[in-house]
Image (spheres, rainbow, N blue to C red):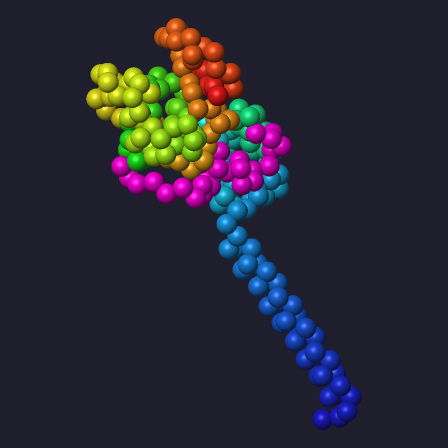
Amino acid sequence: MTGYTKRVLAILLAVVLFFAISGGVLTGITADNAGVSWVTSRLGSTGSEVRSIQKKLKSLGHYKGNVDGIYGTATKNAVTAFQRSCGITADGICGKKTLLYLGLGDSGNSYSDSDVELLAKVISAEARGESYEGQVAVGAVILNRVAHPSFPDSLSGVVYQKGAFSCVNDSNWYQPVAESSKRAARDALNGWDPTGGAIYYFNPAKTNDAFMHSRPVIKTIGSHRFCM
């Protein structure tokens, strides 16, 4: 083997090693990214998370397109509309907060199966006939109370607090729990709060309670006013 041939082989070997090392580094970056808990989906994004976003938005009536995993203009507009309905920044970008509001994130809360069943039961009794967003909103108010210092610090404590929810003492409490209420309970537990932090709600057509009517209204969803 001539000296020239050896030099050519050495150069080729160096090139191969360079791309092998570069490929390893890039592979490592890809693997690290694959393990990230939160992915920000935006215009141009593709993949399974985008499909989940589209499916959820379609079930909520904000998205009319195909569930194809492509974050196009229609998906961005649907995300923007959903964000506006929730009172969060309407930028069309589906980041951590928007995913939580969609019920697709991990809120970090730990609730037992009986807690989920109880929340669904209250939602079903209190928000029967309301839109899906309105059902989630009732669940969110209950969870907001759990976190608020003025209320009991457990879900059952909030639900059964004397005089808090009239439904626990009427016939609605014994009706079958609607499937939509079960889904709404899970979405509320996952962090979706359509009310923007409300701790009270009431139907103005059904109550003349002066205290409730005096509360600052954050949002009206269906027949309920949500207040602080």
Most common secondary structure along the magenta stretch: loop
Picture quarter containing residue 205? top left
Is 162 positioned to the left or the right of 139 in the image?
left
Residue range of the region highlighted in magenta in the rendering: 88-114
- Quadrant position of residue 18: bottom right
Q: Is residue 103 above or below residue 178?
A: below
Q: Depth check: give the residue in front, 183 or 166.
A: 166
Query: In the visual, does 75 lie left or right of 190?
Result: right
Q: For this rendering, which residue is in front, 17 or 192?
A: 192
Magenta stretch contains residue 91: yes
Can residue 86 be seen by looking at this rendering? Answer: yes
Residue at (35, 17) in percent of width and height: 129
User: Residue 3 appears in which quarter of the rendering?
Assistant: bottom right
Q: Is residue 215 above or below residue 139?
A: above
The percent position of residue 200, horizontal first and vertical second, equals 42, 20
Q: Residue at x 55, y 31 (%)?
A: 79
Specify whether residue 225 is painted magenta.
Answer: no
Q: Is residue 174 above or below residue 21?
A: above
Residue farthest along the front direction in this orientation: 150
Observer-nearest of 151 and 131 = 151
Residue at 49 percent of width and 45 percent of height = 48
Quadrant of the rendering where the N terminus is positioned: bottom right
